[in-house]
Image (spheres, grey):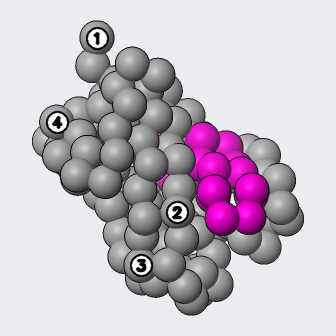
């Protein structure tokens, strides 16, 4: 079973990977990004846990849209566009990008369910 496309495996596995549970931990500098889907991105549910302060959020994604479904730690910590001061998931057509805009390095666990996320 493939939890992530090969691109996301290559991007995150250099930090830490636990493919059996479908989770990945990654440290992102301020303004750093991870491309979650490039050219092919269908509907998916993405859970994000920010390990430094315990904040978490769930995002729903699809063609050319992202919705913040639920959050802990306040909605001001999460963004569905490229928003300064927030952790963001950005969608543009079939492309999906995860970006740290918090102003400092941060550590994340990502949980991605459904969707087809590969190059």
Q: x, y percentage for residue 65?
A: 51, 52
* Mark 3 burial class by Cα count in 10 Å: few <14, some 14-19, many 20+: some
Residue 62 within the segment the image draws in magenta: yes
Q: Which residues are magenta?
A: 47-67
- Residue on which the image places disc 2: 107
Disc 1 is placed on an element classified as loop
Q: CA distance from mark 4 to mark 1?
A: 12 Å
Earlier-in-chain disc, 3 versus 4: 4
Residue under the point 43% across and 64% down: 27
Percent x, y of residue 111:
51, 36
- Rendered residue at 34%/46% (across/down): 16
Q: Which is nearer the eye, 38 or 49?
A: 49
Real-space Cα separation, disc 2 to disc 1, in angstroms: 26 Å
Q: Is 31 left, or right, of 12 in this rendering? A: right
**Earlier sequence position, callout 3 versus callout 2:** 3
In the rendered image, which residue does mark 4 sit on?
A: 6
Residue lying at 63% horizontally and 58% vertically, measured from the top left: 50
Q: Is residue 57 left or right of residue 18?
A: right
Question: Looking at the rendered structure, which numbered label has been put on residue 72?
Answer: none
Asked whether the beta carbons under mark 2 and mark 4 sit within 8 Å of each other, the answer is: no
> Dot 1 corresponds to which residue?
1
Which mark's residue is nearer the viewer, 2 or 1?
Answer: 2
In this view, the mark in front (2 or 4): 2
**Closer to us: 17 or 89:** 17
Q: Quadrant of the N terminus?
A: top left
Residue 29 image label: 3
**Dot 1 surroundings within 10 Å: few (below 14), some, or many (20 or more)?**
few
Q: Are marks 2 and 1 in contact (CB under 8 Å)?
A: no
């Amino acid at each position: 079973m493939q939890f992530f496309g090969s691109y996301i495996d290559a991007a995150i596995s250099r930090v830490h990977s636990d493919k059996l549970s479908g989770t990945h931990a990654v440290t992102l500098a301020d303004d750093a990004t991870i491309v979650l889907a490039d050219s092919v991105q269908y509907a998916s549910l993405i859970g994000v846990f920010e390990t430094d302060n315990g904040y978490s959020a769930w995002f729903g994604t699809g063609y050319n849209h992202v919705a913040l479904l639920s959050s802990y730690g306040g909605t001001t910590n999460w963004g569905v566009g490229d928003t300064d001061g927030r952790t963001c998931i950005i969608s543009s057509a079939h492309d999906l990008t995860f970006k740290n805009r918090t102003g400092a390095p941060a550590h994340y666990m990502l949980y991605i369910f459904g969707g087809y996320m590969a190059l």
